[in-house]
Image (cartoon, rainbow, N blue to C red):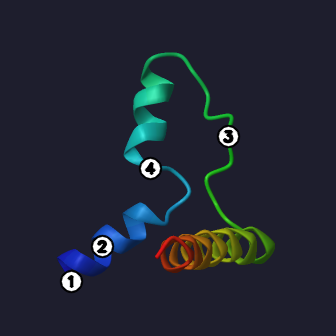
């Protein structure tokens, strides 16, 4: 039950950091969620950089 509650808090609209910012008189300005296209782009960049490193490592031998 406690783990499920933590998940709801993490993925809820307001996080602990948002509350801290609000107490300091600031407002959250940056979007913290990733859409499908963002996740695909991030995955592509990770895979591409990994493949490049492997290729360069084998090319240097």
Which of the two labelled residues, at mark 4 and mark 2, occupies the earlier sequence position?
2
Cβ–Cβ under 8 Å for marks 2 and 1: yes
In which quadrant of the rendered image does the N terminus lie?
bottom left
Q: Nearer the viewer, residue 6 or 52?
A: 52
Does 24 sit left or right of 2 as displayed? right
For marks 3 and 2, give the CA distance: 25 Å
**Circle 2 sits in a helix, a strand or a loop, which is it?**
helix
Which of the two labelled residues, at mark 3 and mark 2, occupies the earlier sequence position?
2
Which of the two labelled residues, at mark 3 and mark 1, occupies the earlier sequence position?
1
* On screen, residue 36 above or below 31: below
Cβ–Cβ under 8 Å for marks 3 and 1: no
Q: Nearer the viewer, residue 37 or 4?
A: 37
Residue 29: % across, % down:
68, 34
Q: Quadrant of residue 34?
A: bottom right
Residue designated by label 2? 5
* On screen, residue 21 above or below 25: below
Most extreme residue toward the top is 25
Which of the two labelled residues, at mark 4 and mark 3, occupies the earlier sequence position?
4
Residue designated by label 4? 15
Cβ–Cβ under 8 Å for marks 1 and 4: no
Q: Which of 43 and 5 is in front in this view?
A: 43
Viewer-nearest of labels 1 and 4?
A: 4
């Amino acid at each position: 039950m406690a783990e499920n509650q933590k998940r709801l808090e993490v993925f809820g609209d307001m996080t602990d950091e948002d509350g801290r910012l609000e107490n300091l008189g600031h407002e959250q300005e940056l979007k913290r969620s990733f859409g499908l296209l963002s996740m695909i782009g991030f995955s592509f960049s990770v895979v591409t950089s990994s493949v490049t490193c492997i290729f360069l490592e084998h090319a240097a031998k």
